[in-house]
Image: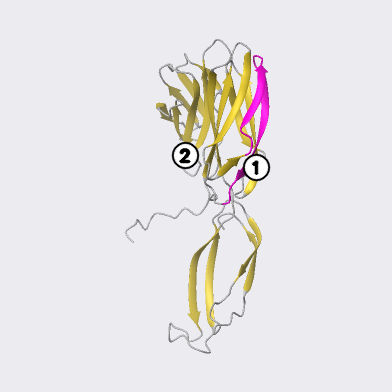
Amino acid sequence: LMGDPSVMTWLTQAEEMTVTAPQTIFNDATSLQVEAVPYAYVAFKNHEQELISATFADADGVATLSFAAPDMVGTFEVAVSAQNYQTAFVPVQVIVPEGPFAAITTMTTDTTPITGTDIHVIAEVKNIGVDNADSVWLVFSSGNNDKVVLFDTMFNIGALAVGQADTVTLNARVLSNTTAGERLTINATVHYDGGNTTQYTYRFNAEGYKITKTYSKLTTSAPDRSYAMGGDTITLEVKYKNTGTIPMRKVKIDYVSPNPMVEVVENSQIISIFPTGG
């Protein structure tokens, strides 16, 4: 009631943003270039989520971050936000120019993560150091134990030569209590050379079906009164919105009355095409 009437209600899903950043930098680096969308806000954080540097992209979507050389190594993160886009997170491995360095370089799903379904998560581990890495193990955990269940949590990779990569597939399930569009995480730890570790966090959005009633109006066949009496014909106008993240087809809506004195004449309707946001 007290809001700004000029503010438009957000009626659709924010788009995913494509962000390009280097996979690795050395710990003596003092700058980082990121490509995103025009005028995006770009931040660079260490593995403790402490802000190192931030700036805005230019009209071409290019941002150059300047900072003091990191005093630690591990998985750092570029976070990019912009209006009408989902915030994007890109991992950047900060390494020393010596010895082995085994780390997750990419994680993705080869199936749509729909709520209540099983998914496959593909992870690539690579030795991006300058020496061979031995005794490489991968350990995965869910950042949302009540929303994502992992059936595979440990993988023995063995040795990785310089520049060598290996790929594993995790079987997981997005539970049905997850909301469409909800942000989910899977954490990965790479163990190698008997004591060294690197971290990686994979973030993804749950997809799902959801219909929301946005409007309803009841009118009677008697224009001179606003209530219904015996013998009246009642017209019910209802508006629905696809507030999920997946387009739907052949959606059937059934209408029933718990009152035996009310007869529903048109008791079902079908929406043949129901696009996201429609």
In this rendering, position of residue 21 left or right of residue 164: left
- Say what amino acid the circle numbered 2 marks: Ala
Picture layout, residue 277 above or below residue 52: below
Q: Are marks 2 and 1 in contact (CB under 8 Å)?
A: no
In this rendering, position of residue 75 left or right of residue 102: left
Q: Residues within 10 Å of mark 1 (few under 14, many from 20)?
A: many
Question: Which residue occupies 61% across, 23% down?
Answer: 137
Is residue 36 shown to the viewer in this render? no
Query: Please, which residue is most extreme toward the left here?
Result: 2
SS under mark 1: strand
Q: Nearer the viewer, residue 199 or 82?
A: 199
- Front tag of 2 and 1: 1
- Principal SS element in the magenta part? strand
Q: Nearer the viewer, residue 103 or 226?
A: 103
Horizontal and vertical percent for residue 162?
64, 14
Range of residues picked out in magenta = 151-176
Horizontal and vertical percent for residue 121?
64, 36
In this rendering, position of residue 225 left or right of residue 36: left
Label total for image: 2
* Disc on res. 119: 1
